[in-house]
């Protein structure tokens, strides 16, 4: 009869320990060097008509809470930047043809900064529908150095 009590006690101890670890790992804030890299990227953005980067502030310590930024919940590393221009296709085609809607009016403008190299754990980068490569510029070569990157959309 003592053996089942020991097993039950062990299960309770393990459950308590794992819930304590979970509460710690899900409260990670971003890595300071990665926050600096994001702020440097923002500095290269000269136009943000929809204020998508308004939450990206020097005083806001936790960049994991910034709009468009996703971090790994255990490590705090930035793993996703999703800054897609959502005005690309939410409207009927006739609105684009008539000129009633112009997605460029909602585009981030500026230059993609090599500071993104500071995001060594970045897996997903979506800057589609924005004007961040300049007129007729090719994809920045440094993006090929992001070794963790598995998704890239600059269309």
Image: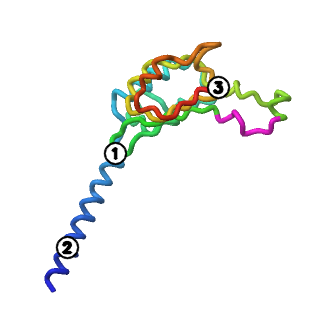
In this rendering, position of residue 24 left or right of residue 148: left
Asked if the stretch drawn in magenta spans residue 89, the answer is yes
Q: Eyeballing the image, is 117 above or below 55?
A: above
Give the residues in magenta. Answer: 86-93
The residue under the point 34% across, 45% down is 74
Place of residue 23 in the rendered image (x, y in percent of width and height, measured from the top left)? 32, 53
Q: Residue furthest left?
A: 2
Q: Residue furthest bottom?
A: 1
The quadrant holding residue 136 is top right
Tag 1 residue: 74
In the image, which is nearer the foreground, mark 1 or mark 3? 1
Place of residue 99 in the rendered image (x, y in percent of width and height, measured from the top left)? 82, 27
Q: Nearer the viewer, residue 154 or 14?
A: 154
Q: Main secondary structure of the magenta part?
A: loop
Tag 3 residue: 107
In this rendering, position of residue 12 left or right of residue 76: left
Q: Eyeballing the image, is 97 above or below 109?
A: below
Place of residue 31 in the rendered image (x, y in percent of width and height, measured from the top left)? 34, 33
Q: Eyeballing the image, is 6 above or below 83?
A: below
Quarter of the image for the N terminus: give it. bottom left
Q: Secondary structure at mark 1?
A: loop
Q: Give the mark nearer the N terminus: 2 vs 3.
A: 2
Q: Eyeballing the image, is 58 above or below 93?
A: above
Q: Colour scheme in the image?
A: rainbow
Q: Give the mark nearer the N terminus: 1 vs 3.
A: 1
The quadrant holding residue 109 is top right
Tag 2 residue: 9
Q: Secondary structure at mark 2?
A: helix
Place of residue 20 in the rendered image (x, y in percent of width and height, measured from the top left)? 27, 57
Q: Nearer the viewer, residue 47 or 123?
A: 123
């Amino acid at each position: 009869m003592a053996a089942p009590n020991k097993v039950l006690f062990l299960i309770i101890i393990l459950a308590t320990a794992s819930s304590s670890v979970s509460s710690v790992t899900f409260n990670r804030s971003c890595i300071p060097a990665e926050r600096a890299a994001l702020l440097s990227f923002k500095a290269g953005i000269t136009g943000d008509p929809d204020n998508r980067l308004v939450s990206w502030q020097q005083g806001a310590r936790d960049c994991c809470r910034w709009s468009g930024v996703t971090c790994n919940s255990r490590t705090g590393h930035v793993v996703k930047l999703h800054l897609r221009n959502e005005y690309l296709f939410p409207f009927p085609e006739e609105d684009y043809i008539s000129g009633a809607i112009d997605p460029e009016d909602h585009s981030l403008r500026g230059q993609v900064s090599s500071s993104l190299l500071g995001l060594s754990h970045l897996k997903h980068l979506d800057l589609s529908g924005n004007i961040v490569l300049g007129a007729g510029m090719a994809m920045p070569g440094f993006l090929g150095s992001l070794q963790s990157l598995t998704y890239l959309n600059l269309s």
